[in-house]
Amino acid sequence: QVQLVESGGGLVQAGGSLRLSCAVSGRTFSNYAMGWFRQAPGKEREFVAAIRRNAGYTYYADFVKGRFTISRDNAKNAVYLQMNSLKPEDTAVYYCAGGVAIVYGNPRTYDYWGQGTQVTVSS
């Protein structure tokens, strides 16, 4: 019933920027907290950032704080991840996720997931 579709991934040189988007359909978007996770080959999925229903509250993993910014537009049913100063170690598949009762860094508390978008950062 709820679908999430990521876009905006691609290949970028180290130090560059990308803006990921996640479009949500099927339910009232404003009722959901939203998050971004990433997974590199051979590694576990890790938390990147999250934003509450109140867009004024955001949470970040230490390794991206100061470089990445999560935001949302409830009128457009969309969440975004602005990624600046990208590093090769940021290379991963990035997933957006949503839920009504999440613990920000715990993927098992999110109810809905997108299919992921590939981000590749060259050195």
Image: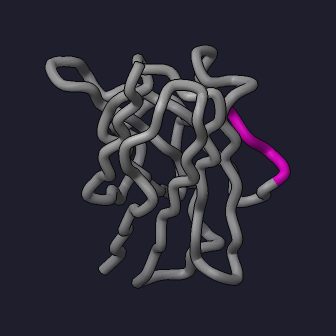
Q: Is residue 80 above or below residue 2?
A: above
- Residue drawn at x 36%, y 28% as measured from the top left: 91
- Residue drawn at x 55%, y 47% as measured from the top left: 18
Percent position of residue 43, x then y: 22, 18
- Residue drawn at x 64%, y 81% as measured from the top left: 76
In this view, the residue farthest toward the left is 42
**97 left or right, relative to 102:** left
Percent position of residue 61, x then y: 59, 22
Foreground pick, 88 / 115: 88
- Quarter holding the C terminus is top left
**69 left or right, relative to 99:** right
Foreground pick, 35 / 121: 121
Q: Is residue 13 above or below residue 42?
A: below
| Membership of 101 in magenta stretch | no
Q: Coloured how? A: one colour
Magenta stretch: dominant secondary structure = strand
- Residue drawn at x 43%, y 52% as measured from the top left: 96
Percent position of residue 107, x then y: 38, 36
Query: Where are the magenta residues, as a range?
Result: 56-60
- Quarter holding the N terminus is bottom left
Foreground pick, 104 / 69: 69
Occupied quadrant, residue 108: top left
Q: Is residue 56 above or below residue 25?
A: above
